[in-house]
Image (cartoon, rainbow, N blue to C red):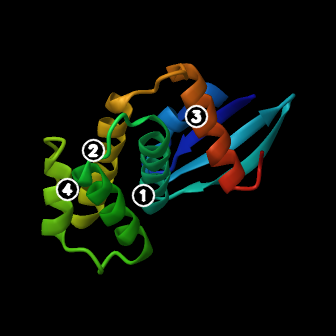
Amino acid sequence: MNFIIFNLNDGSQKSCDLANLSQSLSPNCEIVRIIGDKHEAVGFVSHALLVHFGVESAHYAYQNYAKKQDPKIEACIDLSKKWIKDQSSVSVVQLKDAAAYAAAYAANAANAAAYAACAAAYAAANAAYAGMSKQEEYIRQGNFILKYFGAE
């Protein structure tokens, strides 16, 4: 299965397969699936939705691969989920503190939420990925994205 990712900020486009879909997304992009010689719109990815995908991947990895539970990782995931639901419900300071766990720096609330999600994903991914290859995990993430848009 192949895709084209259209970046609506700069007009660029990138081709990818299912295994690289989750790694190819950027804020404000459109996912288009290539089916033979036709193109099918899958969906628009906003910054908040990109954070959502990152948080869900982090949460999945944490639940399924972490060798031990870490309250700081859980805090990153929880704060990011809270921010996704209501961007005014979490302060920039809270998000920056969560992001700092992974030595990330963010200038505003949206970036802080993204970095907090990345911090959680990084920490959870480092905790294991036992039994599943990186390629299999990327395919799982790609399928999650397609399922989100109802395009599986």
Among the two numbered marks 2 and 4 on one chain, the one whose residue lies closer to the N terminus: 4
Q: Secondary structure at mark 1?
A: helix
Give the x, y percent position of residue 70.
Answer: 26, 47
Asked whether disc 1 touches disc 3, contact meaning CB atoms under 8 Å apart, the reply is no
Picture quarter containing residue 106? bottom left
The quadrant the N terminus occupies is top right
Asked whether disc 2 touches disc 4, contact meaning CB atoms under 8 Å apart, the reply is yes
Asked whether disc 1 touches disc 4, contact meaning CB atoms under 8 Å apart, the reply is no
Residue 47 circle label: 1
Among the two numbered marks 1 and 4 on one chain, the one whose residue lies closer to the N terminus: 1
Residues at marks 1 and 4, CA–CA distance in whole angstroms: 18 Å
Give the x, y percent position of residue 81.
Answer: 40, 65
- Taking the image as drawn, is residue 96 in sight? yes
Residue closer to the observer: 35 or 67: 67
Residue position marked by numbered label 3 in the rendering: 21
The quadrant the C terminus occupies is top right
Among the two numbered marks 3 and 4 on one chain, the one whose residue lies closer to the N terminus: 3
Residue 98 circle label: 4
Disc 2 marks a residue whose amino acid type is Ala
Residue position marked by numbered label 2 in the rendering: 119
Residues at marks 2 and 4, CA–CA distance in whole angstroms: 8 Å
Near mark 2 (Cα within 10 A), the count class, few <14, some 14-19 or many ≥20, is many
